[in-house]
């Protein structure tokens, strides 16, 4: 059974993850894609970067869906636990990469969301 505090943490994680996907998309269209456009339409690196930028959003949306599921039923089986662990470890790693590069803004969702998921398992 999922405690009410764990449910709340998971709902907040789902909301934060969905909001991050929206913000990430907006940032792409406002800043990243115009810069990539300057490289030229035929530049395969620019095309790949644009696709990759948008592809990242699916991870945030998928985690939102899982957080909603986990808030209802808990992280009970080995597959949910494996997914949660893998996703959270990856997010912490990517946050660390941004931090090392001197880019601090992405660290908040990249570390905050998995922290909420992890805390939900301790309460």
Image: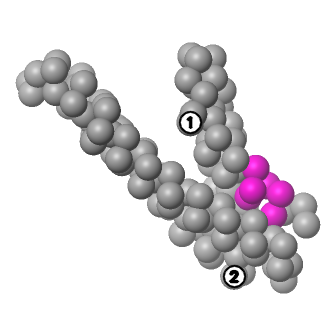
Decide: is 85 above or below 9: above
- The label nearer to you, 2 versus 1, is 1
Give how far across and how far down residue 64 sits, in percent: 55, 64
Q: What is the quadrant of the C terminus in the image?
A: bottom right
Residue 42's x, y, as percent? 8, 24
Count of numbered badges drawn on the protein: 2
In the displayed structure, would residue 89 be above or below residue 63?
above
Q: Secondary structure at mark 1?
A: loop
Q: Residues within 10 Å of mark 2 (few under 14, many from 20)?
A: some
Displayed quadrant of residue 118: bottom right
Identify the magenta region. Answer: 115-120
Residue 116 lies in the magenta-colored region: yes
Q: Position of residue 57 (x, y in %)?
A: 42, 50
Assess disc 1: are there few (<14), some (14-19) or many (≥20) residues with their C-alpha within 10 Å of its C-alpha: some
Left or right: where does residue 77 sit relative to residue 104? right
Indicate left or right for 93 with 24 as reference. Answer: right
When the figure is inspected, residue 6 is found, relative to residue 35, above or below; the finding is below
Of residues 28 and 60, the one nearer the viewer is: 28
User: 115 or 38, which lies in front?
Assistant: 38
Residue designated by label 1: 106
Residue 26 part of the magenta-drawn span: no
Q: Can residue 22 be seen from the camera position used here?
A: yes
**Number of the label disc, if any, that sits on residue 21:** none
- Measured as percent of width and height from the top left, residue 49 is found at 30, 30
Q: Is residue 64 left or right of residue 53?
A: right
Query: What label does residue 72 carry, if any?
Result: 2
Q: Residue at x 56, y 36 (%)?
A: 106
């Amino acid at each position: 059974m999922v405690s009410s505090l764990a449910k709340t943490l998971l709902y907040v994680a789902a909301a934060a993850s969905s909001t991050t996907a929206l913000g990430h998309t907006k940032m792409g269209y406002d800043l990243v894609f115009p810069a990539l456009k300057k490289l030229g339409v035929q530049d395969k690196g620019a095309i790949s970067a644009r696709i990759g930028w948008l592809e990242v959003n699916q991870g945030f949306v998928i985690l939102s869906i899982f957080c909603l599921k986990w808030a209802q039923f808990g992280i009970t089986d080995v597959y949910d636990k494996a997914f949660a662990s893998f996703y959270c470890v990856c997010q912490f790693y990517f946050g660390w990469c941004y931090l090392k590069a001197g880019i601090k803004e992405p660290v908040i969702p990249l570390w905050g969301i998995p922290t909420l998921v992890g805390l939900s398992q301790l309460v």
